Image: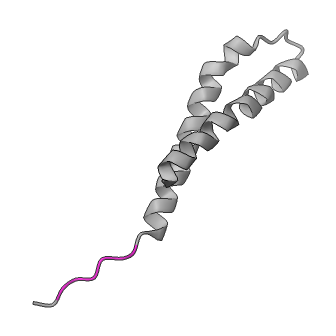
Amino acid sequence: MIRAYAIGLAAATIRPIVGGFFGAALARGQQPNPHEFFGTAFWIGFTLHLIAAEAWINYTRPAMQASAA
């Protein structure tokens, strides 16, 4: 469930990342095209959320107890 939620958040994060790239291009005085940034924003969004979800899963996973035989 955590992984599925992370994918949903990643899809929602792509537009703000594209907006950040768009704003940075405008600040440099370039004529930006959102199609140039979409692929990069897609991978950044999904990769960051995948890393965050896996880190959370590993952080909250109960520790395995060694069984005394």
Percent coordinates x, y for residue 28 in the rendering: 87, 19
Q: Is residue 63 above or below residue 14?
A: below
| Quadrant of residue 32 within the rendered picture | top right
Q: Residue at x 79, y 27 (%)?
A: 19
Colour scheme of the picture: one colour
Q: Is residue 44 above or below residue 53?
A: above
Q: Residue at x 74, y 26 (%)?
A: 18
Residue ranking furthest to the front? 1
Residue 36 relative to residue 57: left or right: right
Numbered range of the magenta stretch: 62-67
Residue 67 relative to residue 33: left or right: left
- The tally of labels here is 0
Percent coordinates x, y for residue 46 in the rendering: 56, 36
Q: Is residue 42 above or below residue 58?
A: above
Q: Residue at x 85, y 9 (%)?
A: 31
Residue 65: in magenta span: yes
Percent coordinates x, y for residue 16 in the rendering: 76, 33
Residue 13 relative to residue 58: left or right: right
- Name the foreground residue: 26 vs 5: 5
Residue 44 relative to residue 68: left or right: right
Q: Main secondary structure of the magenta part?
A: loop
Residue 51: in magenta span: no
- Name the foreground residue: 55 vs 7: 7
Q: Residue at x 67, y 31 (%)?
A: 14
Residue ranking furthest to the bottom? 68
Percent coordinates x, y for residue 67 in the rendering: 18, 85
Q: Which quadrant does the C terminus fall into?
A: bottom left
